[in-house]
């Protein structure tokens, strides 16, 4: 086993047409092609998907949990920003 | 006819059983978590195909034996897989080289078997083709990665290809049952696949910057039940539960 690990990739899978790709997890692979194959084997072996995206984890810029206060808390008391005053018809799924 | 068809089915199915056992034994021992799961998936695909073949063979035999009896309770000489698939998982290069050298053949075989007059066999072939296409894609990729990788990976892959090359010719040998089934329009004439096989294999080897072995000395015997020394060990693993606890169910 090599001492140096393959880079980490994030895997996004669309479970059926019409739905968005959702983050499924991560894995190691030497390059994008291998990441796709590994994602196929690791995350879609139980028929979970119709499309896979992979992106190397280092290309994802994440928010810093230390800044959660200033980033997210101001939204907590602004209930009027949620469309909760409407009745959603049953036909509208995946809202 | 019945006896030949039975033998013919085993000739195809035993390859998948034994290769499936080899790949399955990597579970938990693959070089990385991802390749470990990939090898296990390939193994499960092959076992799935094997079940369809053995269920059909059991029906043809019609004497009460089941798919499990056929898989688990034969003696070494009664297995008719090619020698290639029973070769050990020496290292990951060997594992992928063995897989690749079999996959190319397997896909060519299934493509032809789809046209069989026997509707069960043609249906199993059609169902298996997508799985085997993926196996070939996976193993070919690894041949190229390791062949065209570092000096060490290149050397290891070259060693594996050189060592396993002697087992490729047997894929295109015909047993008596094969010949009868070809005449009946049921079986595939494997002798006709040989040229395409080596063409496709050589293309990948060249892309992988590997030398195509020139050896003209080939091993044979598996199709007649004469196996290499590795087979007995493999079967003792495979058959352990049924031999120790006869008729046990899980």
Image: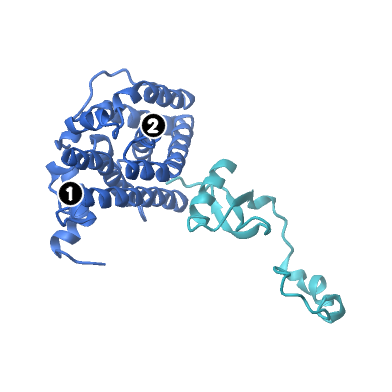
**Which of B114/B239 is in front?**
B114
Subunit ID for the residue under disc 2: B
Mark 2 crowdedness (10 Å alpha carbons): few <14, some 14-19, many ≥20: some
Residue B5 position within the rendered picture, expressed as x and y whole percent measured from the top left: 22, 40
Tell me the colour chain B is drawn in: blue
Q: Which chain is cyan?
A: A
x, y percent for residue B155:
39, 29
Tell me the tag on residue B108: 2
Crowd band around label 1 with a 10 angstrom C-alpha radius: few (<14), some (14–19), many (20+):
some
The disc numbered 1 marks a residue on which chain?
B
Mark positioned earlier in the residue sequence (2 or 1): 1
**Whether residue B239 can be seen here:** yes
- Which residue is at 45% across, 53% downward? B33
Q: For residue B61, which numbered disc appears in the image?
A: 1
Residue under the image location 26 percent in, 18 percent down: B216
Is residue B237 something one can see in this rendering? no
Helix, strand or loop at mark 1: helix
Left or right of B88 on screen, residue A3: right
Mark 2 → mark 1, Cα distance in angstroms: 27 Å
* Whether residue B248 is situated above or below residue B130 in the rendered picture: below
Residue at the spot 17% in from the left edge and 49% down from the top edge: B61
On the same chain: label 2 and label 1?
Answer: yes
Is B103 in front, or is A9? B103
């Amino acid at each position: 086993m090599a001492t140096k690990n393959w880079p980490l990739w994030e895997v996004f899978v669309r479970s059926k047409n019409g739905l968005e790709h959702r983050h499924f997890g991560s894995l190691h692979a030497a390059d994008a092609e291998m990441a796709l194959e590994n994602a196929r084997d690791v995350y879609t072996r139980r028929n979970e998907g119709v499309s896979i995206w992979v992106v190397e984890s280092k290309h994802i810029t994440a928010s810093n949990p230390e800044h959660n206060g200033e980033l997210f808390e101001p939204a907590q008391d602004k209930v009027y920003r949620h469309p909760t005053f409407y009745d959603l018809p049953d036909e509208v799924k995946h809202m | 006819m019945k006896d030949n068809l039975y033998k013919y089915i085993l000739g195809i199915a035993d390859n998948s059983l034994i290769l499936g056992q080899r790949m399955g034994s990597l579970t938990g021992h693959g070089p990385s978590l991802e390749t470990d799961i990939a090898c296990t998936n390939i193994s499960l695909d092959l076992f799935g195909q094997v079940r369809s073949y053995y269920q059909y063979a059991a029906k043809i035999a019609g004497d009460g034996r089941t798919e499990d009896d056929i898989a688990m309770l034969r003696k070494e000489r009664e297995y008719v897989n090619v020698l290639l698939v029973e070769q050990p998982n020496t290292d990951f290069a060997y594992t992928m080289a063995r897989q690749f050298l079999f996959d190319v053949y397997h896909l060519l075989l299934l493509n032809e078997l789809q046209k069989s007059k026997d509707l069960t066999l043609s249906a199993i072939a059609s169902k298996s083709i997508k799985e085997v296409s993926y196996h070939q894609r996976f193993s070919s990729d690894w041949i190229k990665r390791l062949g065209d990788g570092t000096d060490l990976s290149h050397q290891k892959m070259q060693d594996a290809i050189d060592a396993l090359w002697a087992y490729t010719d047997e894929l295109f040998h015909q047993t008596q049952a094969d010949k009868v089934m070809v005449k009946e329009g049921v079986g595939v004439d494997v002798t006709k696949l040989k040229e395409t096989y080596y063409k496709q294999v050589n293309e990948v080897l060249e892309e992988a910057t590997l030398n195509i072995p020139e050896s003209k000395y080939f091993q044979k015997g598996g199709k007649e039940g004469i196996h290499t020394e590795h087979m007995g060990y493999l079967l003792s693993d495979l058959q352990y539960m049924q031999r120790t606890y006869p008729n046990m169910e899980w």
